[in-house]
Amino acid sequence: MSANNHIEILAKSSSGNPYTVRFYLEEDGISAFCSCPAGDHRKLCKHVIRLINGDDSILYDGNQKQILLDISTHLQGTAIPVLLSELNESEILLENARKNARKAKKTLEKVVLGK
Ligand SMILES: [Zn+2]
C-alpha cells in the first residue's frame, strides 16, 4: 500500500452530520485525521479512539464494517493495541477511583455533618 493511500470512514456525530475520519495506513502504525472540532485541533478525539478500538457502533455507514475490520487487522502488527489497552485499563482504574472518592466523601460527610 502506498504512503498516499488512505481510507475514509464516516463517524456518527451528536449533530447528525457525520465526521470524516481519514486513516493513512503505515508500515508500523497509522495516521488519523478527523474532521470534528477536536480533530481539527489535532487532539485524539473519541471518533478516532472508538474506531481504532474496532467499535463499529460509531459507523455512520454500516457498510463500512469491513473497512473497519481491515484497519483492526492492520493495527495488530503495531504498538497500538497495547497502548489502547493501557488507556482502557487506566480509564477503568480512574472510574473506580472516582467511585471510591465519592463514597469516602459521603462517609466523611455523614460523620462531620451528622447526616
Ligand atoms: Zn473526531
Image (cartoon, grey):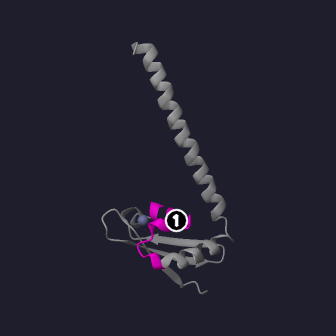
- Asked if residue 115 is positioned above or below residue 89 in the image, the reply reads above
The amino acid type found where label 1 is placed reads: Asp
Disc 1 packing (10 Å; few <14; some 14–19; many ≥20): some
Image position, residue 5 (x, y; %): 54, 85
Q: Quadrant of the C terminus?
A: top left
Question: Is residue 9 part of the magenta span, yes or no?
Answer: no
- Residue 50 visible in image: yes
Q: Which one is in front, 15 or 80? A: 15
Q: Secondary structure at mark 1?
A: loop
Q: Which residue, as the protein is rendered here, is positioned at the far bottom?
A: 2
Characterize the magenta stretch by its predominant secondary structure: helix
Image position, residue 12 (x, y; %): 39, 68
Residue sitting at x 47%, y 31%? 102
Residue sitting at x 48%, y 21%? 107
Residue sitting at x 59%, y 87%? 2
Image position, residue 31 (x, y; %): 54, 72
Please name the residue that numbered disc 1 is placed on: 55
**Res 1 → quadrant:** bottom right
Q: Which residue, as the protein is rendered here, is positioned at the far right?
A: 77
Q: Is residue 70 left or right of residue 102?
A: right
- Asked if residue 66 is positioned above or below residue 85 in the image, the reply reads below
**Res 43 → quadrant:** bottom left
Q: Magenta region: which residues?
A: 44-63
Q: Is residue 30 left or right of residue 79?
A: left
- Residue 45 visible in image: no
**Res 36 → quadrant:** bottom left
Quadrant containing ligand 1: bottom left
- Asked if residue 68 is positioned above or below residue 94 in the image, the reply reads below
Q: Which one is in front, 39 or 12? A: 12
